[in-house]
Amino acid sequence: MRHSVRRFLALDVLLGAAVVGLAFAALAEGVVDGPGWLLYVGLTTTAFALTLLGAVAEHGHGGAASGLRPGGPRAYAPALVHSVRSVHGESGRLVLDPRATGALFAFDLTVVPEGRRPFRVEVRHPLDVQDLLHRGRAVVEYDPRQPWRVVLPDRPPHEWLARAERLDEDVAATAGGSPRGLPPGAHVLVTGALVAAGLVGALHLAG
């Protein structure tokens, strides 16, 4: 919760929210009782802002797990390996040569954390650090508070490797979908809407 609040108050979020808020406010005023040019400016800037935020969200998630937060909580968990593919890091398209520029390994995993339901997730990494092309089990490191943050550690502890080898494949049948947090850009969109509401309210009170 504290992390989410800090994220809303981050400088990049506040700057982006100011731009989005002005665009939304211009659109609202243009629709209600503003001049025609204000409506045109509001429509143009709002469309541009929404397109940009949509692109950021798609690029930020891309169907894959997010990385761990610096200094955030983390725990190990065993995982089943369903498949390993080579994909382009930005587009997510299949790549025939894993050594090609921009190529990443995409690991389709079922993570089995302690005390919670298993979940399916895709983790991307530039290297096959655990030799998963030839193995059906892995060890991941994830954030217990934000379980959509999952990575493959280079050298997982031996005890967790042993746990992974003992995993039953039937556990995959009980797995839920990949957990998700707010997509990138959502903080800017929400804060921008609040800024717009405040600006419109202030203008009407002043007028």
Image (cartoon, rainbow, N blue to C red):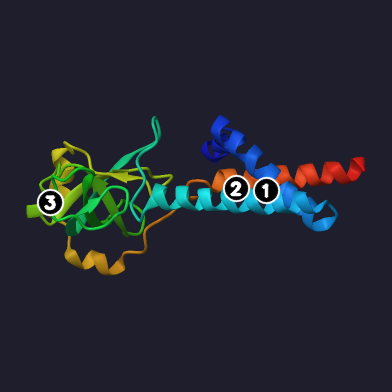
Dot 3 crowding, Cα within 10 Å, few <14, some 14–19, many 20+: few
Query: In the picture shown, does residue 119 fall above or below 57?
Result: below
Amino acid type, callout 2 = Leu
Find disc 1 in the rendering and name its residue.
193
Q: Secondary structure at mark 2?
A: helix
Q: Looking at the picture, how far across and down is residue 58, in whole percent?
A: 42, 53
- The numbered mark, 2 or 3, whose residue comes first in the sequence reads 3
Q: Give residue 148's position: percent from left, percent from top.
A: 38, 50
Where on the picture, by quarter, is residue 74? top left
Task: Say whether disc 1 or disc 3 marks the residue closer to the N-terminus.
Answer: 3
Pointers 1 and 3 in contact (C-beta within 8 Å):
no
Q: Amino acid at mark 1?
A: Ala
Front in this rendered view, residue 30 or 7 = 30
**Which residue position holds label 3?**
97
Nearer to the camera, 44 or 20: 44
Residue ID for mark 2: 189
Are discs 2 and 1 less than 8 Å apart at CB? yes
Q: Residue furthest left?
A: 134
